[in-house]
Image: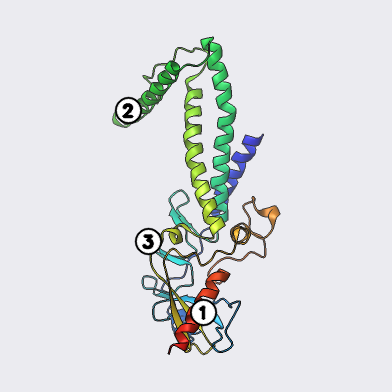
Amino acid sequence: MIALALCTMSWICYIVIMLKPAIQLPLNNTKFKNEDVKYNFPNVHNIPSSADDECPVVALSLSDNQGGRLYCSKCKSVRPERTHHCKECQRCVPKMDHHCLWINGCVDDSNYKCFFLFVFYVAFYCLWAESDILPRLLHAIRAELKEDISLKFAWRLYKLYLLCVYHLWKNVVLMIWYRRWIPLFDGVQTLGLKGINMHWYILAALGILFGLAVSGFALVHLYYILKNQTSIEYIADRPIYVRADFDQTGKNFEVVLVQPHTNIYDIGYYGNWCSVMGSNPFLWFIPIKASGDHCGFRKVFPYNANFCDQVIKEAQSLRKAR
């Protein structure tokens, strides 16, 4: 029952991802660009937690090195924070993690929760199935051998695995060449254990391989969630420019340079987790979003409090040095 439930949840998550396409920034949005150029004060900004009475900072936002809005030259449009251009989709995608071939689209802010749950349930299903199959298989092998499993038998099993891989690809090539069906494992010799079907060995090997591979992938994305980063942000090596506005005129600001690999969106493990999985604990492991959880280009991503204080102090120092 547990294996069936995990398999069902995996398929549900995958179907939800496929039916819900990623949010994409419209191409060649000239009207949005012109309106944004006239109004320089950032529409999406973060109110700092502290400010100096002499030089109060009213807003922080990411910008270019001149303090201008972030702009995508390929889409020819202003792009919000945490938005990246996808070469395959040829669009800007909000909080893009990566372009996934298995879903034929981008993993972004709108479907990242479903993607993580899909990977999580697949990994859990593989490991659960392996934990159920492997003891039964070992017990059946011991019963056939009428003795304990030795290193010699393990070596024979490993050679059988290599032969299976060889004959699998050989038979695939022969089927394509002769255009007729050939059993995939035709030519593979058995271990001499007549009471155990060859498919149990293959299933056990695939369970270990897929379980370990997908589990590692799930753990990596769990780390990204707890750190509130995407794959692109984690490996990014470009400097970050933060614009500190001292009023709402859009002309009174300073630009602060932040070193690469600075995690500016880390708001604590619980806050980072809720920003992706939702604020309702009962819906964390269900592939739906709560009604109060927003996503898209209008979403505001709060900055780390220590990062805000550091940028504010540096911006105020730059202003006083003038």
Where residue 266 sits in the image (x, y, percent)? Answer: 55, 63
Mark 2–mark 3 distance (CA, rounded to whole Å): 36 Å
**Disc 3 residue type?**
Lys
**Disc 2 residue type?**
Lys
Within 10 Å of disc 2 (Cα), the crowding (few <14, some 14-19, many 20+) is some
**Disc 1 residue type?**
Lys
Residue depth check, mark 1 versus mark 3: number of the one nearer the observer: 1
The residue at which mark 2 appears reads as: 170
Horizontal side of residue 185 vs 121, given as left or right: left
Judged from the image, the secondary structure of the residue bearing numbered disc 3 is loop
The residue at which mark 1 appears reads as: 313
Q: Which mark is residue 87?
A: 3
Q: Is residue 220 above or below residue 252?
A: above
User: Residue 294 occupies which quadrant of the picture?
Assistant: bottom right
Q: Residue at x 44, y 87 (%)?
A: 321
Residue 46 visible to an observer of this rendering: yes
Residue 181 visible to an observer of this rendering: no
Q: Are marks 2 and 3 in contact (CB under 8 Å)?
A: no
Judged from the image, the secondary structure of the residue bearing numbered disc 2 is helix
Within 10 Å of disc 3 (Cα), the crowding (few <14, some 14-19, many 20+) is few
Q: Is residue 138 above or below residue 270?
A: above
* Of the pair 244 and 102, the residue shown nearer to us: 244
Mark 1–mark 3 distance (CA, rounded to whole Å): 38 Å
Q: Is residue 23 above or below residue 287?
A: below
Q: Residue at x 62, y 35 (%)?
A: 3
| Circle nearer the N terminus (1, 3) | 3
* Of the pair 291 and 147, the residue shown nearer to us: 147
Q: Residue at x 58, y 64 (%)?
A: 267
| Circle nearer the N terminus (2, 3) | 3
Q: Residue at x 43, y 81 (%)?
A: 67
Horizontal side of residue 199 vs 13, given as left or right: left
Q: Is residue 270 above or below residue 53?
A: above
